[in-house]
Amino acid sequence: MKNKMIFRKNPDIITRKIGSQLILVPLYKSSEEINCIYSLNPAAEKVWQSIDGKKTWENIKKELAEEFLDTYDANLNEIKKEFSVFLKDLREIKAIKN
């Protein structure tokens, strides 16, 4: 089911590149509400950049799986598991919507 879903980024989450690190910063009404920012590793950054509100989750996985296999020396099952974990994390912090 989630493979057919199309996700879009929550406009209340902004991204900033600090050095080589991409961070996600939730926007809130006051600074007292901010209790965390999120730092993405290079693989997570590529996934985040692929979420465009047009591609299905399955298309994003297929698009990046081959690159991840070569770049991160992982097997396909590990990649699928990490994609699922990252999707769950993004949903929990409300960084994406469907």
Image: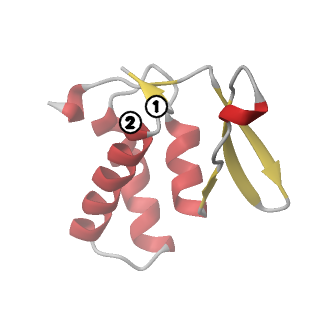
Residue beneath the point at 25% across and 61% down: 81
- Residue 72 percent location from the top left of the image: 47, 75
Q: Helix, strand, or loop for circle 1?
A: loop
**Left or right placement of residue 71 versus residue 62 in this view:** right
- Residue 9 percent location from the top left of the image: 53, 26
Q: Are marks 2 and 1 in contact (CB under 8 Å)?
A: yes
Tell me the tag on residue 86: none
Seen in the picture, residue 67 relative to 48 is either above or below; the reply is below
Tell me the tag on residue 94: 1
Q: Residues within 10 Å of mark 1 (few under 14, many from 20)?
A: some
Residue beneath the point at 36% across and 44% down: 87
Rendered image quadrant of residue 24: top right
Please state, as top left, top right, bottom left or bottom right, where the C terminus lies in the image: top left
Residue beneath the point at 52% across and 38% down: 50
Tell me the tag on residue 91: 2
**Left or right placement of residue 87 versus residue 78 in this view:** right
Q: Helix, strand, or loop for circle 2?
A: helix
**Left or right placement of residue 90 versus residue 40 in this view:** left
Q: Residue reaching furthest right?
A: 19
Q: Nearer the viewer, residue 89 or 68?
A: 89
Please state, as top left, top right, bottom left or bottom right, where the N terminus lies in the image: top left
Q: Residue reaching furthest bottom?
A: 73
Hey, what amino acid is under mark 2?
Arg
